Amino acid sequence: MKMFNSLKLKLLFSFFIINVIILSIYGTFIYNTAKKGVLNTTDTELKMISIDVIPDFQRGDSEDAKYVADELISEFSIEPLFVKIIHYGKNSKKIEHETLSSKEHEWLFDVPLNEIGHLGSIYYFNKKDFRVSSMMIFDKPDTKVFIQLALQKNMDSLYLKQLFLGLIIATPILLIVFLIIAGILINRTLLPVKGVISSVKSISANNLSNRVSTKEIPSEIKDLVATFNQLLNNLEVSFNKITDFSNNASHELKTPLTVIRGEIEVALKQDREPSEYKEILEDILQESISIQKMIEQLFFLAKKDITEIINEFDELYLDEVLTDTIFQLEKLAPSKDIHIEIKKIIPITIQANETLLKIAINNIIRNAILYSKNDSFVNISLDENSKEYLLIVEDNGQGIAKEDLEYIFERFYRADKTRSRKDGGIGLGLSIVKMILDIHHYDIEIKTILNVGTTVIVKIPKLNKATKCSSKIIRNSYFCML
């Protein structure tokens, strides 16, 4: 049923069932206790009547049960009342004489005599609607005298009827009152949940940075709110990656695509010499390469979770990675008459992601080549001090202005807007370098003098040789580093 999809209705229904059971048990207990009280009253009455007969027997006036019954009915105004008088022989150990006030009610006295009882001892028995008592009222030298009385149980008394009616009326009223109280309590209990739902509904793609407050939240749902906030964190990161990729791609693709379209339109306006077509195709190729490079770097920025990248860390030789990268970039340097000079390289073993580290080193050295003056040097060294290894790349380029220095790691920021596009830069290289170094917990420092040159220093913490690194520690990105 749809109604049971509601937590509030489920709680109210459960509370209703529990209260029906409790009130039924409680009502039954009260009614049975009242019935027992009425029965005890009847027993007390039977005992008083039995005791009242004793003086008559002592005088020898009460040998006939019918006479005794009539006297008692007259005295106590109790009717119907049936009497049986029994004389039990001590020597013969059997009933020697008995009288009944009513032969047709003889079945009422088919009860144990308890002849071994003491004087005044009384026993009670149930016979359908009657309560029967048996009491030894006289003990002669050779005979014991018992009187047995049968009195109708007063189970239909006005008291019991009123009590039963009261329970029938009171139980539903109590149920309604309890349900109202329960509803109020449940509403107050669920109020924080409604607040959480309201906060969640207010969060959209435009305000994913908002979080559900945990203030005044019961501890029972605090974990749920914390889990939801963590989900929002993950969602915000993923959404920002998608948004950044979409915005950045749409923004950066406009220029190269416009250039390609313009070149093609110019080529198609009139017939041209093969050399002119070749030049146009070269321009288109350069723009295509620029687009390809930009898309690859944009995909990297929107890459998988950092934990997955860290899981790919392995032991590698940094000096070999550096020399391989230099070898690849030496083809770019001659086009600008740039000379790459290796000042110093020492053998270094580190834990890192080789592919990512090559991208970072490649971008640093490529920038040094692209922004160096023609016929100049790019100096590279791999050295160390007491705490860290130092990768140093120094160029003789235009340098970076102080006002640009704090923004150079931002995506698509270009300190030299005119040269970056021409030289193939799209403002993503250093942002990727910073991201890779942050993943590895490496620091980067840039020293620059305008129109003189720039020095980039990558600081790599040394492994503690006294510590044995486990793969688990490496995956948790501590890398056993000092």
Image (cartoon, grey):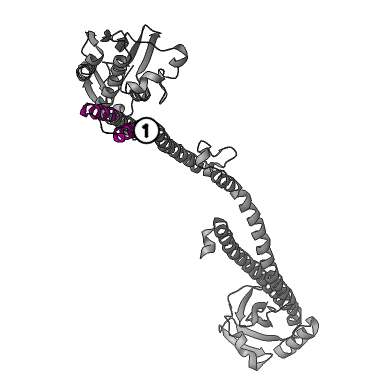
* Along the viewing direction, whichever of 62 and 269 lies nearer the viewer: 269
| 284 magenta-colored | yes
Q: Tell me the quarter of the picture where residue 422 sits.
A: top left
Which of the 4 image quarters holds residue 98?
Answer: bottom right
Asked if residue 301 can be seen in this view, the reply is: no
Question: Which x, y percent locates residue 233?
Answer: 46, 36
Position above or below: 62 against 274 = below
Residue at 67 percent across and 92 percent down: it is 102
Answer with left or right where residue 459 lies relative to residue 220.
left
* Residue 321 is inside the magenta segment: no
Q: Residue at x 70, y 75 (%)?
A: 42
The residue nearer to you, when weighing 50 against 458, is: 458
| Quadrant holding the C terminus | top left
Q: Position of residue 247 (x, y in %)?
A: 43, 35
Residue bearing the label numbered 1: 258
Q: Main secondary structure of the magenta part?
A: helix
Q: Amino acid at mark 1?
A: Thr
Q: Say if 394 sits above or below 107 in the image.
A: above
Looking at the rendering, the stretch of residues picked out in magenta corresponds to 260-286
Q: Looking at the image, is 336 positioned above or below residue 299? A: above
Crowd rating for badge 1 (residues with CA inside 10 Å; few <14, some 14–19, many 20+): few
> In the rendered image, is residue 420 in sight?
yes
Numbered circles on residues, count: 1
Spot occupied by residue 159 in the image (x, y as percentages of width and height) = 74, 73
Spot occupied by residue 149 in the image (x, y as percentages of width and height): 67, 82
Residue 465, picture quadrant:
top left
Residue lying farthest to the front in this orientation: 270
Residue sitting nearer the eye, 124 or 86: 124
Q: Secondary structure at mark 1?
A: helix
